[in-house]
Amino acid sequence: MNITLTPGKLWGLRRMADARGIYKMTAVDQRPPIKTPIAKHLGVDQAPWDQVARFKRMLVEELQGPSTAMLLDPHYAIPHAVDVLSPTKGLIVTLEDSVFRETGGGRLSDSIDDWSVAKIKRMGGDAVKVLAWYRPDASDEVCQAQKDYVKRVGEDCAKHDIPFLFELLVYPLAGDADQTKDYVEMSGKRTDDVLGSVEEFAHPDYGVDVFKLESPVAAKDCDGSEAVQQAFDEMGRLAGRPWVMLSAGAGKPEFKSVLEHAFAAGASGFLAGRAIWLDAFTHYPDWDAIGTELRGGSLEYMGEISRLADDHATPWNLHPCYGAAGAGFSPADASFRHGYEEA
């Protein structure tokens, strides 16, 4: 596959990376992983909006310096923190709702009410991010619904000429032993499920520009072995385009090991959240302690994995999918002409 980019996609992909084409991106779009601990601490059913939003604003203020781009959500981070995000940083906006539908055959994803690819483009977003829960062995109806949803988003991103950054997570089905609805790495996940999911959504029909992927093996098992590296190598081959790693709640040492395997397999960087800032969040509701930890351990870790990316990650624009000359675009591309004529 040799991919030629339209001007809008090329520009957005560049905006998210550093000058060399390496992605060092921080996720601030998490909702349940922030809302749930706050609600539990306060002894309430729903975390107060201002408490969640305050933490997200701190994340943007304190962590944007070393970040090439930040991932914000429309519920909290956009309304309360986009004003402090530097215009020199890439802006990725989450489209999927964090409240998914659990059915007997698997999980169903959907977009946030009153949000769309068009709205993200209008507000100046550099990319659209969507997370889809997926298991190749879920029911046929659920698998098809998830495929249809992702394809619609991909089509809208092509229409509005904005990059589609797609995140995949496997999850427990009804018959699995370890049940959780938390946004964490599935206990006992199978490598084949991760690889099969990547293989499906790498098809051109979905329009994915960058994959945000979980480790194909449990983060705790990323031990530098040849077998683990082979799993990462296969994941990169199946992706067939630039890809970055997510942390899925892994600890700092574990996520660093994940990145070492990923960069050896051709990953172009990371888009991570909790591995960077979770230690700070444990100080809630001591806002001073949270700020101190963000400016200390969080920034130190961000620097550590950023240096690892500088030394070993593959620049996105030099991914083999773009051919020997690297990423480029054709103004005469039919899809771009179509979008221009519609505008």
Image (spheres, rainbow, N blue to C red):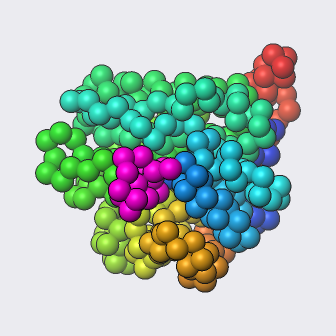
Q: What stretch is highlighted in magenta?
A: 31-48
x%, y% of residue 210?
59, 47
x%, y% of residue 77?
63, 50
x%, y% of residue 67?
69, 66
Residue at screen point 54% across, 32% down = 112
- Image quarter for residue 125? top right
- Image quarter for residue 64? bottom right
Is 128 left, or right, of 167 in this rendering? right
Residue 44 is one of the magenta-drawn residues = yes
Is 166 left, or right, of 164 in this rendering? left
Q: Can residue 325 be seen in this view?
A: no
- Image quarter for residue 43? bottom left
Q: In this view, does 144 lie above or below 190?
A: above
In the image shown, does 17 or 118 lie closer to the viewer?
Answer: 118
Residue 20 is one of the magenta-drawn residues = no
Q: Main secondary structure of the magenta part?
A: helix
Quadrant placement of the C terminus: top right
Q: In this view, does 122 lie above or below 170?
A: above
